[in-house]
Image (spheres, rainbow, N blue to C red):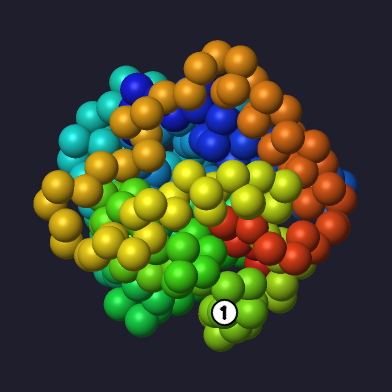
Amino acid sequence: MSRVEETHWWYRGLRDVITQSLREPRFRLPPSPHVLDAGCGTGQNLKALGELLQPAYLGGFDISEDGLGFARRKVPAADLYQSDLANPSLHVGELDLVVSLDVICLPGVERAREGLKKVVAALRPGGLFVLNLPAYDWLYSEHDAAVHTTERYTSQRVRALLKSLGLRVELLSYRLFFLFPLVVLRRLPSLMRARPGDRDARSDLHAMPTEFTNRSLLAVLKLESQLIARGARLPWGSSVFAIGRKA
């Protein structure tokens, strides 16, 4: 993940939809915001948030100390520490933005619910909670087994989750809409045989695309990001992207 997330079309596309959304006037944050990445992984998304927002506080936690080691090299000024979304430690009392990108799907909603409530409680009024999650249980593949995904989601389920946390749903859409047939075809061979806990499962990240393919797929995602940031609700895709706001 650390090796590919700076250049891989999927990771860059995710950062692009976040960046384009946060640049929209309705999602503009106060100057010098307090920002937390709840499940920061190896740090590239946190680095992008720091460059975009110039926050007064930039923090991130992750359950993996190995991942945090990579993140510290990428974002040395950030407050990075080991913690679990199911029972998180928070180093500041108030936050303006929390992002959680493909993290809730690891412990599952019910195990993470109390931790999510704690994180949302730290948001200031008007603060934003940005989520990205994998879509559709039937799309569970070898990649999911390799990265320890336990759940995939629908947009309706993500809407219900945000509302249960007391957040107003400001943006909700599937992602990888245009590329969805390619994603399904790519994963089709492993859909039937994928099983949670498979120690031999391999992530899609083991096969880096060619430079031309990478650029082409990213160009499609950037177009899609513009639509989503401006309020389009794409009807299907392999991920669900959402922004909730605290009243």
Q: Is residue 27 visible?
A: yes
Q: Is residue 212 above or below residue 95?
A: above
Residue shown at the point (48%, 23%) measured from the top left: 209
Q: Quadrant of residue 129?
A: bottom right
Which of the pair 101/217 is nearer the observer? Answer: 217
Which of the pair 144/110 is nearer the observer? Answer: 144
Q: Is residue 118 visible?
A: no
Q: Is residue 158 above or below residue 59?
A: below
Q: Is residue 226 above or below residue 104?
A: above
Outermost residue to the top: 211
Residue shown at the point (27%, 56%) measured from the top left: 145
* Other residues around mark 1 within 10 Å, as few (<14) / some (14–19) / many (≥20): few
Residue type, numbered disc 1: Arg
Which of the pair 69/216 is nearer the observer? Answer: 216
Q: Position of residue 18 (x, y in %)?
A: 66, 44
Q: Quadrant of the N terminus?
A: top left
Q: Position of residue 205 (x, y in %)?
A: 37, 34
Q: Position of residue 42 (x, y in %)?
A: 34, 34
Residue shown at the point (84%, 58%) measured from the top left: 232
Left or right of 168, for residue 200: left
Left or right of 157, for residue 222: right
Outermost residue to the front: 189
Outermost residue to the left: 199
User: In this figure, what is the number of numbered marks?
Assistant: 1
The residue indicated by pointer 1 is 157
Residue shown at the point (66%, 45%) measured from the top left: 179
Q: Quadrant of the C terminus?
A: bottom right
